[in-house]
Amino acid sequence: MKKTAAEPYRDIDFTNAKRGPVVPSEPGKTKISIRLDNRVLEYFRSIVETAGGGNYQTLINDALMAYIQQQSMLEAVRQAVREELQPVVEQAGLTRHCRDERNSSLLGFEVGNLDAIG
């Protein structure tokens, strides 16, 4: 990046100035300061550079939004699996507290796997 020299001192009248950003922020967006690993910044900046332009911050935001949507989808799938398994569990009389003490399983189902669903 090209270095620029500082401007010489100027006497600026701020009597009629207004506080706040010169350009208002977009609705639904908040300006923050965040520390990211250099590798993260390099990755997103390289994508922008390869594409021939763009905004790496937008790419980071898009990646975070995709993560949120993925988590929502995973929760929806978990809920659907719980609802589908509930009649089977009730019919078999299974609960999370009924364990085969030899291998801590629920009649062939791993306790950890059922706990991951619920």
Image (tube, rainbow, N blue to C red):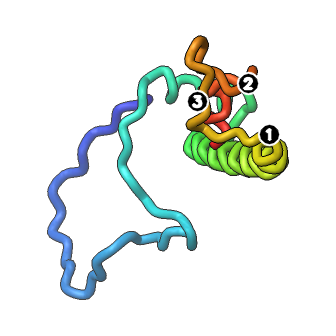
Amino acid identity at mark 1: Ala
Q: Give the side of residue 38 with respect to residue 116, left or right.
A: left
User: Dot 2 corresponds to which residue?
Assistant: 107
The reply to whether discs 1 and 2 touch (Cβ–Cβ < 8 Å) is: yes
**Quarter of the rendering containing residue 85:** top right
User: Dot 1 corresponds to which residue?
Assistant: 92
Q: Residue at x 33, y 74 (%)?
A: 20
Q: In the rendering, which numbered label is found on residue 13?
A: none
Disc 3 vs disc 2: which is toward the camera?
2
User: Dot 3 corresponds to which residue?
Assistant: 45
Q: Position of residue 44 (x, y in %)?
A: 60, 30
Instruction: Give the mark nearer the N terminus: 1 vs 3.
Output: 3
Above or below, 106 against 5 in this view is above
Q: Position of residue 83 (x, y in %)?
A: 79, 52
- Separation of marks 1 and 2 at Cα, in angstroms: 10 Å
Q: Residue at x 83, y 49 (%)?
A: 87
Q: Nearer the viewer, residue 68 or 54?
A: 68
Q: Give the side of residue 4 with respect to residue 108, left or right.
A: left
Q: Position of residue 79 (x, y in %)?
A: 73, 50
State the residue lying farthest toward the bottom.
Answer: 16
